[in-house]
Amino acid sequence: MANLSVNFAGVTFKNPIVPASGAFGFGREYEELYPLSTLGGISTKGTTLEPRNGNPAPRIAETPSGMLNSVGLQNPGIDSFLEHEVPYLATKDTRIIANIAGSTIEDCVETARRIEGSAVDMIELNISCPNVKEGGVAFGVNCNSAQTITEAVRNVTTKPLMVKLSPNVTSITDIAKAVEAGGADAVSLINTLLGMKIDINTRRPILRNNVGGLSGPAVFPVAVRMVWQVANSVSIPVCGMGGVSTWKDAVEMMLAGASLVQIGAALFDTPFAPMKIIDGLNQYLDDNKIENINDIIGKVQPW
């Protein structure tokens, strides 16, 4: 069996498969299906300084080869996360990635500051959520604001800092370079693409928020393209996500340059998707006589 472990921004993951933030909660429900210790890590539900109720329902709509969501960062707040979820996850022998967001830079800074000293292994700063009226993607569509918020959070934490990028921009590489300049240790991409679905009978949008984030297999080719572009533009490691559903998708994402791979929408259709992908990666490496998964990272050979 090949070596699946990867070192990502100074943190060793036993394998590169990580359930994505917002799709896996804090892992409690999934532990009834399989041990969380089989996962490389868990990116926890996006957490803000104060608790949030999220957007009004309907918040989910099915689309061809994907789904729209506008949950709006419903979460219990950072203090509850640190008191109840982190101690629980710390016993599961997997890496804890704390996904954080906020309406202001000060919110994100204070949230990151409170995480310092906890068992969290890495912070994922979400500057790309399309489903909140303040903050979120507003930080991630401009190089100056992306760099500024990255610098501010960098200054209050010694934890490895990964910044989650939005695809709803004109140049994903420019944003990636900006957060690298701001002190990010890694980047993750892509968050969801902004979309809309309309009920033709009521003539109203399906989502109460009118628009939402599109995820699932429909966005996968966009994600691979952006991961490849960013991996060739920055010196920090890249975590790839966006429509990864099978082990073949994970291999493709790693060939494009991703060192970690997050699984999101696939979990709603196939809760066992991470297990199947880990098994598939092992088989792929064995079949191709590759002893170390790091040997496929960024090894796509473009024409």
Image (cartoon, rainbow, N blue to C red):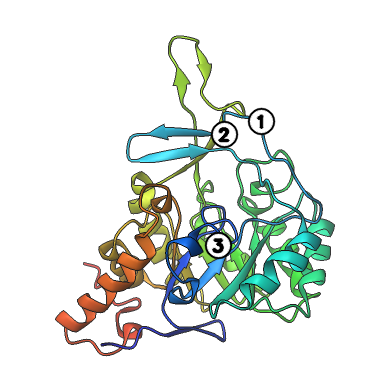
Where does the image place residue 80, in percent across and percent down from the top left? 77, 60
The crowding category of the residue bearing disc 1, from other C-alpha atoms within 10 Å (few below 14, some 14 to 19, many at least 20), is few
Amino acid type, residue under disc 3 in the picture: Gly
Task: Where is residue 281? Give x, y as percent.
Answer: 28, 74
Rounded to the nearest angstrom, the CA distance separating label 2 from label 1 is 7 Å
In this view, 10 is above or below 189: below
- Estimate how packed mark 2 is, as few (under 14), some (14 to 19) or many (20 or more) residues with alpha carbons within 10 Å: many
Residue occupying image coordinates x 69% and y 52%: 139
Residue 40: x and y in percent read 46, 76
Classify 60 as above or below 174. above
**SS state under label 3:** loop
Label 2 sits on what residue type?
Answer: Arg
The tag on residue 36 is none
Quadrant for the C terminus, please.
bottom left
Q: Earlier in the sequence, mark 3 or mark 2?
A: 3
Residue indicated by mark 2: 59
Which amino acid is tagged 1? Pro
Q: Residue furthest top?
A: 201
Observer-nearest of 239 and 174:
239
To which residue does mark 3 refer?
27
Callouts 2 and 1 close, C-beta under 8 Å: yes
From the image, tell me which residue sits under label 1.
56
Element carrying mark 1: loop
Marks 3 and 2, how far apart at CA: 21 Å
Q: Is mark 2 on a helix, strand or loop?
A: loop
Task: Residue 25: tell me if it is visible.
Answer: yes
Taking the spot 79% from the left edge, 67% from the top edge, the residue there is 152
Foreground label between 1 and 3: 3
Within 10 angstroms of label 3, few (less than 14), some, or many (20 or more) residues? many
Instruction: Using residue 172 as the reference point, say whether residue 143 is left or right of it.
Output: right
Residue 14 left/right relative to 175: left
Q: On the picture, is 208 further left or further right than 218?
A: right
